[in-house]
Image (cartoon, coloured by chain):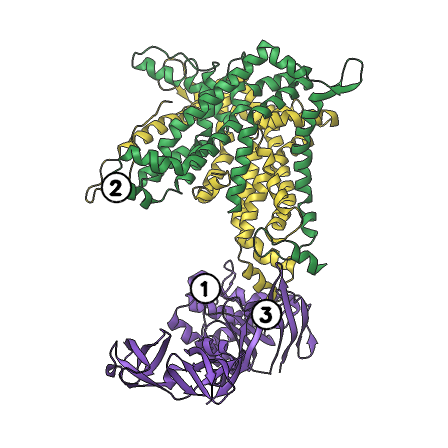
Amino acid sequence: MERVSPVISAPAMAPNRPPIDWAGIIFTALLSAAIVLPLIVVGTWAFTEVWRYPNVVPQQFGLRFWNQTLTRADVWSALTISLQLSTVVTLLSAAICLPAAYAFARMDFPGRTVLFFSFLAGHAFPKFGLLIAIAAIFLQLNLIGTFWGVVLIQLVGTLLFMIWIPVAAFQSVDRRMEEAARDVGASPLRVFWSITLPQAGPTIAAAVLLSFVGTFYETEGAWLIGAPGIRTMPVLMISFINNQMVIQYGAVLSVMLWVPSFIALMFARRVIGGGAFARGFGG
Amino acid sequence: MTDAAEGAKRPLIEGAASRRPTGLLLVAIPVFLVGWLVIWPIINAIGRTLWRPDASGTMGFDLSSYVFFFSDQYSINNLTITLWTTLMCAILLLVICLPIALYLRFSHGRLPAYVQALAIFPMFVPSIILAYAFIRVLGPNGMVDILLNSVGLPKIRTPYLTPWGPVIGLVWDNIPLTVLILLSGLGNVANHAIEAARDVGANRLQVFWHIILPRISNSLLVAISFAVLGIFSSFTLPYLLGPAAPEMMGPFMNRTFREVNDPLNAITQAVITFGFCIAFGLFYVRSVARNQGQ
Amino acid sequence: MSVLKISEVSKIFAGPTVAVDKFSLDVADGELVCLLGPSGSGKSTLLRMIGGFERPTSGLITIDGEDITHQPPEKRPTGMVFQSHALWTHMNVFKNLAFGLKLRRLPASEIKQRVEAVLELVGLAGYGGRGVNQLSGGQQQRVALARSLVLEPKILLLDEPFASLDQHLRERLREEVRDIQQRLKITTLFVTHGQDEALAMADRIVVMRDGRTEQVDRPDIIYREPQTPFVAGFIGTMNLVEGEVSNGHFKRAGFAVDMPIADGPAVLAVRPEALDLTAAEPGTARVHRVTDYGTHGLVDLDLRDGTRLKSMVAHPDLFKPGQGVDLRPQAVSAYRDNQRAYRS
């Protein structure tokens, strides 16, 4: 992983022919090798039937292991559980966080600033340490190994995103637009429904998607709180890797697992990139 | 109520309507969840490990679980490997991400766009898939071995199940956010500040040292804090890629809690990780709060 | 049709800052009244209280005798046009206009008919299907006006509606708005900080300062007979000279004007176009700069103590910088204790 480049690239000054962007070429080559190659290898394994060392390419391609993986009962139950969890958590999170976000963005009440920043608390501590502390409490409440225990733990994980991003979205809605709607006769509730929500819509949709995908891939809370009763896709994947089962199972599962992430990637391309996202992390 | 209440405080963000308890009602559930599932567990964890019944059943101040941790060689080894991993990751992240961020900040065109897309890509690869890919590429008889063998070179000594395994995985995982945070910090460095420095004769290294570095020092610290908070108690990657002993704090806590079934010592370990990260956590909160306040 | 009555309305913000201080005004049926004042004079706050977006701390607002002081905006028969047009960008032009009508549960055919009629009125017939962001700034402001008009409000409120437009467009739009207002005979309150706009459009102007009324009058009277030095200085260009009156003469640094009022300090006000110059050496003032505007010229003068005056002259080429002149004021006023004490 050594890719130290001594070149600090400065704005290209050459007037006519741009100089060759050596730094860019080096970065591209190294990052491609480090980031794209591993994923290609996984993708290749997923469609491989026989690949014996030391051949550079598989001896036999095929979909046999897709068939085998998809007929496994544990895969289907994990997929069902994961989708159920993500759906329930996302809906619950939207139901409790969006009104709260609106309140933070548009209303004034005692302790508003402190409460707003209190959502950072969950991110100011090492995550797994916090999970252990929560698990100790869940142990007393008999929530370990239950569906709702995992829902709770993942719900807490979505709070920061699901409040802070929509707050920014609501705040960027021009108040005069809302006032204009009141002016033509809309009640406050109607203004929220017909003006504020559609205006803030795309950003809020991004936050909702983020919480869905984030919950789907959440591994550590599900592992610690959910086991043994609740087995999500990532938890199943851990056992596939640990138990050294047929290599292709892991590969097929990886490719399947990556689909929601790919959708998120396509969607997030617009949201990320502007500095706004990194600023959310204090950058 | 209107007059007195309205006179009390101007809202944080201009234009909030009136000061009504409706707002409190709307934020009640999320705030309750944070209180119950973040603040309370932490207080509870500290309380339970310090103030608990002794052998005779009377409650009292008791440091013995901490004394045990710091006198137990196995625990100490685990803590040491965690600190070593965190430090290595922080150094590698800076060494890798700072040049990338600098390159992205000062270049335009299609190649930098591609480099940025690549650098942010790991954000969309769940760490569990990363762990699997790591094993297939760097594990025994993995892709690297295959490629080396095909050109007649010896196999590598695989980092899989060694302390370097988690380091490589965690660095890979943390590149996107580090690059994004540094890039956002570099956005604060004005082009004309650099041009002015070049104008008075500073070379590239001097520009970096005297102009750029002072402006992004805060972003550097935020990036490091964020990475440290994530890496110190990471679980999935060390659990799957690291050695069985010594193990990092994440897998250690997991095993103490679930396999050894010893919640008290698991909580003690958790509180110790809090203690080691408290400075980074506070710094992170302060930076975010300051950014939001702007 | 509709009469707006504002009685003793005050607004005190946290701080406390008095934004509007016991303001009273009656707006007659079909009248267009301009609230004119510098920023921070409370004119926008006053308009927002009439629209229902701020609650008055005290006072009473009625429309046609009905008390609306504490009604929410959606219950008031007022229509507001905002500075930034505040159009709903997720709806097209037609939907922007139809939204309020739909809330009133009108049948679709009537909505369509009324929207089209109003679009015709503001000169945007056929623009219904356009997205709001596809329109120019002037068109957007016309849609905003149409959105208010389509509901046939009793009172039309305009909050600096042309502030974000360029000079040329602003002049054209204010004529259009004035035409529409007169055609519909709609009672209108218009907030602006531009005196040109106020002078060009208003039936009456309310000059506001620090939340209070300085003067309420027809535009020509405001211009010709400002009641306070603030109004005198705010409307048009005015030379304001502080000096002393003694024995029926106002004096400042060698500049003297007949003024039959009691002795004491006073502020002399004279418009540049009412200050004639004649060449004289050494003279009471010296020419500092001459600016030729083609149709007329403006001469900057310094009194002996450096006080700067402006004079409008028909032939600027007659004057050169450094030259001495005597001043012949044709029409002057004087103010004392913030009130007019003399008018020639």
In the picture of the structure, the residue carrying the numbered disc 1 is: C130
Please determine whether, in this image, residue A92 is positioned above or below residue B225: below
Secondary structure category for the residue under label 3: helix
Q: What is the x, y in percent for residue B172?
A: 44, 26
In the picture of the structure, the residue carrying the numbered disc 3 is: C46
In the picture of the structure, the residue carrying the numbered disc 2 is: B200
Query: Tags 1 and 2 in contact by the CB under 8 Å rule?
Result: no
Instruction: Say which chain is yellow.
Output: A
The one nearer the camera, B130 or A251, is: B130
Q: Residue furthest left?
A: A16
Secondary structure category for the residue under label 2: loop
Q: Amino acid at mark 2?
A: Val
Q: What is the x, y in percent for residue C31?
A: 56, 82
Q: Distance of mark 1 from mark 2, alpha carbons?
A: 54 Å
The one nearer the camera, B129 or C70, is: C70
Q: Amino acid at mark 1?
A: Arg
Please determine whether, in this image, residue B269 is positioned above or below residue B179: above
Q: What is the x, y in percent for residue C37?
A: 51, 72
Q: Chain of mark 1?
A: C
Q: Distance of mark 3 from mark 1, alpha carbons?
A: 34 Å
Q: Chain of mark 3?
A: C
Instruction: Say which chain is purple.
Output: C
